[in-house]
Every structure is written in C-alpha cells, then in structure tokens.
Amino acid sequence: MNINEIAKLAGVSRATVSRYLNNGYVSDEKKERIQEVIDRTGYKPSTQAQTLRTKKTRLIGVILPKINSDSISRMVAGISVVLKEAGYQLLLANTENREKEELEYLRLFSENHVDGIILIATIITREHKRALKALQVPVVLLGQRLDGYSCVYQDDCLAARDVSRLLLRGAGKIGCIGVTQQDEAVGAGRRKGFLEAAGDAGIAEDAVSFLETGFSVEDGYRAMDQLLALCPGADAVFCATDSIALGALARLQEAGRQIPEEVALAGVGDTVSGRIVSPKLTSVHFYYKTSGKEAARLLLELLDGNEARKQIKMGYRVEERGTTRQR
Amino acid sequence: MNINEIAKLAGVSRATVSRYLNNGYVSDEKKERIQEVIDRTGYKPSTQAQTLRTKKTRLIGVILPKINSDSISRMVAGISVVLKEAGYQLLLANTENREKEELEYLRLFSENHVDGIILIATIITREHKRALKALQVPVVLLGQRLDGYSCVYQDDCLAARDVSRLLLRGAGKIGCIGVTQQDEAVGAGRRKGFLEAAGDAGIAEDAVSFLETGFSVEDGYRAMDQLLALCPGADAVFCATDSIALGALARLQEAGRQIPEEVALAGVGDTVSGRIVSPKLTSVHFYYKTSGKEAARLLLELLDGNEARKQIKMGYRVEERGTTRQR
C-alpha cells in the first residue's frame, strides 16, 4: 500500500493525500474519505519518507566525549527531562574523546536525522569551528564557551580557585595534576584558578610541580605515582577532576601517606565516588543536571526561531570534606 | 540542484542518474557525463533521500539502560571497536531504565535510521518480546538471554556463587542486597548463585536477610542502612552489583564497622571504583568489553545474511580483595 493507492481508493489526487499526511489544507469531506481508506487498509506512512517531506524528525543529537562519567550523565539527564517534555527523543553519539569522531558526528547529525544538536564540548579546534559553522541545524555548546554560539558552561576558574584555598591551608610544597590546556574549561580554566589561590597563598608558579594527564581514575593513579617520585615532599595536591583525585588518593594511600595530615587533596566536580571513599573528597559541586536543562531550553529557543544566542555561566558550591586540612 | 536538473544537464534520464548514484548499471560514457555535471555543479545527493533509495544508513542503534556505568561503557567500547572497523557509526539511546522508552527506541530505530540494533537488556517483558518480534532490522541482545535471539550474556549465577563462597568464610548471620528478580541476570541469576553458596555453607534461605534495591551507589547506601536496622549482627553481606556494594561499604564505615573483620562484603562486576576504595572490594570480573565485541560480531553476521542465531555465555574471574576474610 502506498500513497498512490490510497489516493486511488479515496478518489482524490496524490497531492491531496500528501497534504493530508503532512497536515496541509484538505477539505473536511476529503479528509474523511482519506482517513477511512487509511483505517481500512492499515496504511502506515514510512517515517523516512515523512521526514523527507516535513524535514522534521523530532530527534535531537547529543554529542558527548564519554559515557562513563558522573558529570556527563547528569548533564544528559537534564537535557533529557526538558527535551522529552517538549516531545523530542535523544540520540547520543559517544566520541570517546576523539576529535575526528566529534567532527564526523557533527556532520552526520547535520546532514540528516536530527532537528538540533547539543555538543558537550571539550577541545574546540579550528576544525570544530569550521564544522559548527557548516551546520544546517541549531546547536548549543555545553561545557565550553565559544563566541557566536549558545553555550552553557561552568565557572571553572573561580570554582578551582575557591577549592584550592581550602586545599592550600598550611601547605608548603604543592602539586597540580591537570589535563591538556587545549581544553579551555577543565585544562586552562581550572589551572588558572588554582594558580590564583597559590599566588594568594604566597606560592609562586615555579614552586609548583605540574603534571598533565587524562580524565580517568587510572590516569590520576599514574600521575600521582609520578608526582611522588618528582616531589616526594608534596603536602597538597590539586586535581583538575574528581576522577583524577580519586586515582591520586588510591596511590597515596597505597604509599602509606596519611590524608589529609601528610598530604591534602582536592578535586573538582563532586562525583558520587568522591563521597564513598574514606576520607571523603573535598571538591566543588557543579550544577550539571541544571546545566543540561538550560542547554536544552536554549536549543528549544533556537528551534522556535529565536535567534538570540545566550551564553549562560553556571554557579558552583565548594564541598569541604575529609581530604583537606582544617587549618 | 536536484536529480532532474543533473539528468537534464547530462543529457540522460532521471532513472540513469538515480542508478548512477546508487551504484547500479550505467554505461561508462554516461557515467562520465553524469560525474562531469556533478563535479561542475557541486551537486551533493541528500543523505536522507539516498537512505530512502538504498535502505542502508551504515548506522547501528545501541539501546542502553543508563550511561553512567562502568559495565555499560565497557560494553559500548567493545561494540564500538568492532562496528567502526566495519564502517558503521553508533547512535546510543539512553532509556534511564524506563521500559516505555526502551520500547519507543526499539520502534524508532526499527522504523528508520539504523541497519541493526544492539539492545543492552535488563528486564524483558511480554511487551519487549512483541516489540522485538516486530523489528524490521536485525537485533542482538547483550546482558540477557532470550530464546530465538542472538545474545551475549554473563554467567551471573556461577559468578555470584563463586564470589559468595569467599564472602561466606566464617560467616554466621548473612544479608543479601539484590535488585528486582524481573531482571533475570542481575536479579534472579545472581541471587540464585548466592543462595547456592549459602546452601553449601549450611545456611538456609530463611536465615538470610534479603533486601531489594536499585542500581545506584545511593541505593546501596540506603539498603545497607535498612539492613543495619533489620539485622544489626550481620557479618557478611552479598551485593548484586559493585555499585550497591560501594554504597553499602560507605554506610558500614560510617557506622564504625570494621571491614572485613566485623562485616565482610562482596560485589559483582569489578568496577574501577571498587579498586580505589579502602579496603578494596572483593568482586567478580566480567569481560564486558569483550562481550560488546562479541555482540557486535553477531550483529555483523546477521547483517551479512547469516541467519544462525548464536547465544554466547561469557566466562568470569573472581577478584579476591580486602572486603572478605581470609578464612
């Protein structure tokens, strides 16, 4: 059964059936005849063909750097609440932090399949900017700020500064385990905030032992292993993420260090795991779920034809727990 | 620029251009003329229209119950390796453990968008069976066994039995924190294995304190809170997942219990977090990444037209660590 046969059985033109299926104008009498044929024959228009005609899929693509992450799953949960309420379904694309795949999914989603995109961004290269510019559907960036685009991002710098102030109480030799500074938010932003706090505490940048690592717990473990060799007397270590801090904590405890008496430690992101280790991890809470909701709302505005591109910087809350010293 | 205009400029029929674009037979001379027009005009066939014609999207849909999970991200990583090598891209659908959404995504993926589906399954209801039967694309189930379908699943029962044998050394009063038995694998299977070990240790089923909870660390924390009230003298607690065990561990440590001397604890799944808590969690390792690869290979076989539906039960490895007693 296809649209031509429906038209024939209903005694109307093919164009009328097409208009009917796409909610265009059709007289009440013809509407009734077409619906009667559809009911009788059990005809079901192919979604793909419909998509081609109406250009609406009611799908939103969300591109994310990894799936096994507290912060990202909270963002996705927030995105999901708002978009599902608005009648959209989500398709997730996991890039495993590979730039090439990010670009491929941007193209895939843009060419077809979705009405809009939320990009949970990490590193934004020139290639990314080119791909974003070429998009044929609205896009919102989550987690990074980029001129000319709707964005929702965290106040990484001040959050890192404030938690570092707790960390650096009574500290002499300090370390910093960060991620690539190509990542403006987690890499450059949090390092900058940490250095501000160090400066306020009278510690010069060249007195700090810096290490750069990846985003996993294992990366944090290995980086702390190196730091112990590089700077065995470190008594306070800032970690750019909770995952890194949790790996670092495991390595320090293995080495028999007392936390926080001998070494204080702080992370960023307030993950669930940070609340179940002992001692509990001092960190900064970001409103990731709310950020996801905000990003989804910005996307809905763009889909509504509202061209004003907002940029939203979210607040944070320092969580003082057991891995930092009281004074 | 559309296909009709290309045909006109190349002096061939519309059908010839269509055949050319879909790799059908076209004489070399006409091929050259069409390609010349395409090059000159910069014509790019719409992927959606192409999809409609060739019915191939080179996309695979993966339906998963949650994204913030060690086990699931390992499965997805395995799926990803194999399918990307075979030239497919993945679209993930996160159902947040909601049955209705699982069914909706099955329908969405089946109607269009993807060439095949991998369902990381939890609960399989009659509705699921109906939806699976109605699928118009091949499907592989990962994590559950279902007659008549290609599946890859874990040996939940024996894995739970073997880790419980370590757990129950020297135990008198025992507890079990599980999940809904509608989940054949994690709920029913692991409970059965635990009970076998309890039986072998001479402990009757009605001497065990059972609690049912959800899949998160917080669920484990709350369940252990209840268990402490219900059975304050429990000296060994089996947890159906590592996440549950990690929440339980945090609650026990808060209550000042010595682990494993006063209370022994075991989980299932060998998550990263279980290796960073102190003491480290006794658990069972499942080959989740390999399972994902196997599922992807089964799907490729189905896509190749190989109708034989295999069912693969994976092995496991007990990880004895610090939360169980030596004897």
Image (spheres, coloured by chain):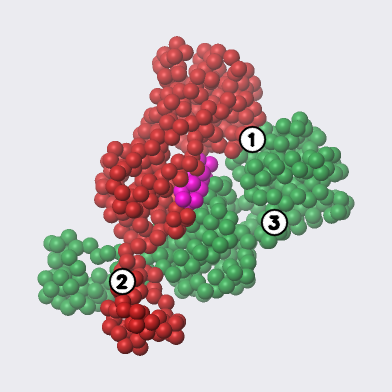
Chain colours: A green, B red
Nearer the observer: mark 3 or 2; the answer is 2
Q: Chain of mark 2?
A: B
Image-based side of A273 in relation to B154, left or right: right
Image-based side of B182 in relation to A316, left or right: left
State how far apart marks 3 and 1 are (Cα). 24 Å
Q: Are marks 3 and 2 on the same chain?
A: no
Answer above or below: position of B170 versus B98: above
Magenta highlight: main SS: helix
The residue range painted magenta reads B65-82
Q: Amino acid at mark 2?
A: Gly
Inspect this view and state whether residue A176 appears.
yes
Image-based side of B125 in relation to A94, left or right: left
Q: Amino acid at mark 1?
A: Ile
Q: Is residue B79 magenta?
A: yes
Q: Which residue sits at x=40%, y=65%?
A: A113
Mark 1 nearby-residue class (10 Å; few <14, some 14–19, many ≥20): many
Q: Which residue is mark 3?
A: A180
Secondary structure at numbered mark 2:
loop
Where does residue A238 sit, x and y in percent of width and height?
75, 47
Instruction: From the viewer's side, name the closer residue of B295 and A307.
Output: B295
Mark on residue B24? 2
Number of disc labels:
3
Answer above or below: position of B225 versus B287: above
Instruction: From the viewer's side, name the closer residue of A192 and A201.
Output: A192
Q: Which residue sits at x=79%, y=46%?
A: A175
Answer above or below: position of A112 versus B148: below
